[in-house]
Amino acid sequence: MYDLDEPDQQRLGFDRGVPAGMTVWRLLTRFDDALVSSVLVGWLRARRPPLAAARPRRYRTVIAVVG
């Protein structure tokens, strides 16, 4: 996270510098994993293209998630 440029820091609300990795880890460990999972699934489904009527048998949508 230390490679964020100034516009990205402002967009994320980091007005007093980028938080340390341990601070981010503490925050993330307090999230409700079921809620985060359902929010991410909804977000990913919203970005999926509409289902086509006829797709090749071996077709599948792949979304890469990092982190």
Image: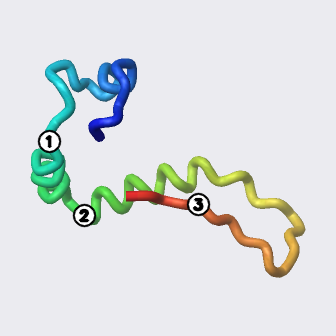
Q: Nearer the viewer, mark 2 or mark 1?
A: 1
Measured along the vertical axis of the image, is residue 4 above or below residue 56?
A: above
Task: Report the quarter where the N terminus lies.
Answer: top left
Percent position of residue 65, x then y: 48, 59
Which residue is painted at 20% across and 19% down in the image? 15
On screen, residue 43 versus residue 29, left or right, reads right
Name the residue tied to disc 2: 33
Which mark is first along the chain, 3 or 1? 1
Percent position of residue 2, x then y: 27, 37
Q: What is the distance, in whole Å, between disc 2 and disc 3 at their CAs?
A: 20 Å
Name the residue tied to disc 1: 20
Within 10 Å of disc 2 (Cα), the crowding (few <14, some 14-19, many 20+) is few
Checking the image for residue 63, the label placed there is 3
Quarter of the image for residue 5 reads top left
Are dots 2 and 1 in contact, CB under 8 Å?
no
Which residue is painted at 15% across and 59% down in the image? 29
Within 10 Å of disc 1 (Cα), the crowding (few <14, some 14-19, many 20+) is few
Q: Three-letter amino acid code at disc 3?
A: Ile
SS at badge 2: helix
Q: Three-letter amino acid code at disc 2?
A: Asp
Q: What is the distance, in whole Å, between disc 2 and disc 1 at their CAs?
A: 22 Å
Q: Three-letter amino acid code at disc 1?
A: Ala
In depth, the one of 41 and 21 nearer the eye is 21
Residue extending farthest bottom:
57
Task: Report the quarter where the C terminus lies.
Answer: bottom left
